[in-house]
Image: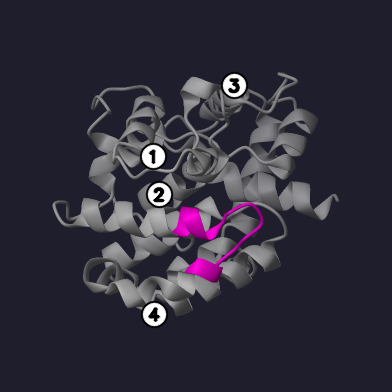
């Protein structure tokens, strides 16, 4: 083990993984809520919208909270057709009204028979699985199992089977599974050791600079490579270094 690198990662973790950094990050949106289902719904949707400038992501996610009447779970379960009209104008980059309306449709169908979105990932995951890969595959298939699922929406819910890095879903899972002053830790069936790094331009840059990542493509294999490299420093909770690498990469822009 590279002890100097371990000290640098630990110092960055202690510096960045604090509540003070939440306000400028998309995770600030689910932090507006306390009920598990509210956190899951708005956390999932915010994570899906998380590409582009962080300020733009946060603005779109706050607009979404407003459209959901400030109560995501209640809205999903009890909305009327007329309540959906404002969503016909909701757009975030390539996320269009068709996508928003299907998200609501799927979530209502799902929560009518499930208490937590965690089940949508763990149904496809063996308890001793080395990572969350099969859970992500199962979630993708479940999300598009309804006959009304639009083909265009598939671009917003990736799967490892297409060699996607699944950055936004891995970030969402980090939020739900890990527990500290940044992440919520409201899910119990998935272990932090099974999480995978949310690989974006900043974590990729720092991963390469620190010698943790060598694969040229930003894809699923790169995610596994970076996560496995971080497991050398913390096999129980390797993804806790996500916010640290992100912060380090962001400040070096």
Are the residues at dot 1 and dot 3 in contact (C-beta closer than 8 Å)? no
In percent of width and height, residue 91 lies at 59, 63
Counting residues from the start of the chain, the first of labels 2 and 3 encountered is 2
Magenta residues, start to end: 88-100
Q: Is residue 72 left or right of residue 153?
A: left
Among numbered discs 4 and 3, the one appearing first in the sequence: 4
> How far is the residue under mark 2 from the one under mark 3?
20 Å
Which residue is tagged 1? 192
Q: Nearer the viewer, residue 148 or 113?
A: 148
User: In 3D space, how far apart are the residues under numbered discs 4 and 3 (Cα atoms)?
Assistant: 39 Å
Few, some or many C-alpha atoms within 10 Å of disc 1 (few <14, some 14-19, many ≥20)?
A: many
SS class, disc 3: helix
Instruction: Tell which of 166 and 212 is nearer to you.
Output: 166
Crowding near the residue tagged with mark 3, few <14, some 14–19, many ≥20 C-alpha atoms within 10 Å? some
- Earlier-in-chain disc, 4 versus 1: 4
Q: Secondary structure at mark 1?
A: helix
Instruction: Give the labeled residue for mark 2.
Output: 178
Which residue is painted at 42% across and 63% down in the image?
A: 42
Give the answer, above or below, for where 241 lies relative to 49: above
Q: CA distance from mark 4 to mark 1?
A: 30 Å
The residue carrying mark 3 is 225
Q: CA distance from mark 4 to mark 2?
A: 25 Å
Taking the spot 36% from the left edge, 64% from the top edge, the residue there is 39
Between 145 and 167, which is closer to the camera in this rendering?
A: 145
Instruction: Tell me if residue 86 comes above or below residue 177 in the rendering.
Output: below
Question: Quick check: 66 above or below 124?
Answer: below
What's the mark number on residue 70?
Answer: 4
Of the residues under marks 2 and 1, which one precedes in the sequence? 2
- Asked whether disc 2 touches disc 1, contact meaning CB atoms under 8 Å apart, the reply is yes
Task: Tell me if label 4 and label 2 are in contact, CB under 8 Å.
Answer: no
């Amino acid at each position: 083990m590279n002890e100097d690198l371990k000290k640098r990662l630990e110092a960055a973790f202690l510096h960045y993984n604090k509540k003070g950094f939440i306000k400028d990050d998309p995770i600030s949106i689910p932090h507006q809520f306390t009920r598990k289902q509210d956190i899951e719904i708005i956390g999932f949707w915010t994570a899906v919208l998380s590409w582009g400038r962080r300020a733009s992501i946060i603005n779109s996610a706050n607009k979404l909270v407003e459209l959901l009447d400030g109560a995501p779970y209640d809205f999903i379960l009890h909305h009327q057709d007329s309540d959906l009209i404002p969503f016909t104008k909701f757009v975030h980059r390539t996320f269009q009204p068709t996508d928003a309306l299907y998200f609501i449709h799927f979530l209502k169908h799902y929560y009518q028979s499930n208490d937590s979105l965690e089940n949508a990932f763990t149904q496809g995951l063996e308890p001793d699985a080395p990572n969350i890969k099969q859970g992500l595959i199962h979630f993708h298939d479940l999300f598009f199992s309804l006959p009304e699922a639009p083909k265009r929406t598939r671009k917003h819910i990736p799967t490892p089977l297409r060699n996607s890095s699944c950055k936004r879903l891995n970030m969402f899972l980090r939020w739900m599974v890990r527990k500290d002053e940044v992440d919520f830790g409201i899910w119990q069936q998935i272990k932090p050791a099974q999480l995978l790094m949310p690989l974006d331009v900043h974590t990729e840059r720092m991963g390469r600079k620190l010698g943790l990542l060598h694969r040229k493509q930003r894809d699923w294999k790169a995610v596994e490579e970076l996560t496995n490299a971080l497991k050398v420093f913390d096999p129980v909770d390797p993804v806790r270094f996500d916010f640290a690498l992100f912060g380090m990469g962001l400040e070096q822009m």
